[in-house]
Image: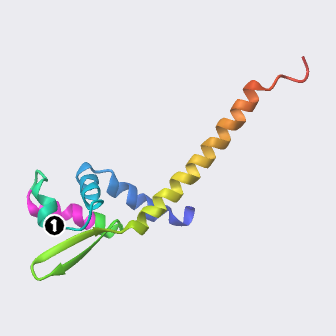
Amino acid sequence: MDQYSAVLDGVFVALADPTRRAVIRRLGRGRASVGDLARDAPMTLPSFMKHVRVLESNGLIRTSKSGRVRTCELNRERFALVEDWLAEQRRIWTDRTDRLERFVTTPEENQ
């Protein structure tokens, strides 16, 4: 997983912002235009576009343009990277807590 650390760091940075998480949440229901996504954001369209660019540059969304309308959709494959990292962390911590439980519950041999 270390070979993906820079990519993973970028994904987590992109997901750290509440506006970008709201965009991801909305795109989870399906494609949407930037205008539709920006409608609920309390900022100007140019400021909102910076958030779209961060999500796109980190591979979380894809955009396409047809005429004057830019449409966004989730790149679900990128989320597999996060899922893999979380599964690895879960395994590590499960192993550690299992060892701790054995240590605490196993009677000492020399008593």
Furthest toward the top, the residue is 111
Give the quarter of the image for residue 14.
Answer: bottom left
Q: Quadrant of the N terminus?
A: bottom right
Q: Residues within 10 Å of mark 1 (few under 14, many from 20)?
A: some
Q: Nearer the viewer, residue 1 or 39?
A: 39
Residue 84 x, y percent position in the rendering: 53, 59
Snapshot colouring: rainbow
In the image, 15: left or right of 46? right
The relative height of residue 91 versus residue 45 in the rendered view (above or below) is above
**Residue at the bottom extreme of this rendering:** 67
Q: Residue at x 20, y 63 (%)?
A: 50
**Which quadrant is home to the C terminus?**
top right
Label 1: element kind? helix
Where is residue 97 shown, x and y percent of the image? 65, 36
Q: Residue at x 12, y 75 (%)?
A: 69
User: Would you say 90 lies left or right of 65 here?
Assistant: right
Write the start and end of the magenta stretch as one range. 44-54
Taking the spot 91% from the left edge, 21% from the top edge, the residue there is 110
Q: Is residue 63 magenta?
A: no
Name the residue type under label 1: Val
**Residue 58 location (% of width, % of height):** 35, 66
Say which quarter of the image contains residue 46: bottom left
Give the residue drawn at x 70%, y 30%.
101
